[in-house]
Amino acid sequence: MNSAVILQIQSAIILLLMHIGVYIILKKKNRLLHAKCMGIAIAWDIILILQIELTRGAIAKAIKVPTNPIILNIHVGMALTCVLLYFVMIYSGRKILKGDKQLLKLHRFSGALALTLRTLVFFTSFMVVS
């Protein structure tokens, strides 16, 4: 099994964990389990990015914006936005768990956007694998 397949399998599992995390909060209303599930998914996703960098030199490829195929630039842009949203999610989620409900709207919006982008990153990853 080559590294591309292993990375894609990990990516699929991460995305599944994120969808399970959404199910946990929407249907089970279990905030602590939601936080744990999403925390694992986010940590694993960041580790996956490091794996991609170490095995493929992703940063060196990504910074060649003018010469990259447009789909690669879109993929990288969505992935970077997703990672930035992870930090918003972690910050707001920790505040919400401590009882600060003021950030709930931001958390929900950022979460929906992050999940949408992460799903699109997964699908575009099949187009940029080389």
Image (spheres, rainbow, N blue to C red):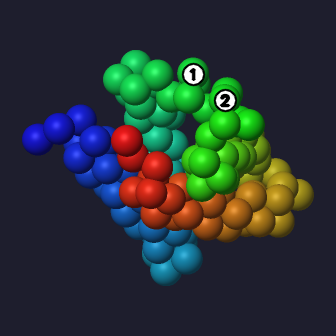
Query: Could you say which is closer to the camera, residue 31 or residue 119?
Result: 119
Q: Residue furthest front?
A: 67
Return the mark for residue 64: 2
Residue at 51% across, 43% down: 42
The disc labelled 2 sits on which kind of residue?
Lys
Quarter of the image with the C terminus in it: top left
Query: Could you say which is closer to the camera, residue 6 or residue 112?
Result: 6
Whether residue 38 sits left or right of residue 76 in the image: it is left
Q: Quadrant of residue 117?
A: bottom right
Quarter of the image with the N terminus in it: top left
Q: Quadrant of residue 13?
A: bottom left
Residue at 35% across, 23% down: 55
Query: Could you say which is closer to the camera, residue 123 or residue 89?
Result: 123
Give how far across and how far down residue 3 sits, in percent. Answer: 24, 35
Give how far across and how far down residue 97 sits, in percent. Answer: 67, 49
The disc labelled 1 sits on which kind of residue?
Ala
Give me the C-alpha separation between circle 1 and circle 2.
7 Å
Q: Is residue 114 visible?
A: yes
Return the mark for residue 60: 1
- Could you classify mark 2 by the number of other residues whose Cα lies within 10 Å: few (under 14), some (14-19), or many (20 or more)? few
Tell whether label 2 touches label 1 (CB within 8 Å): yes
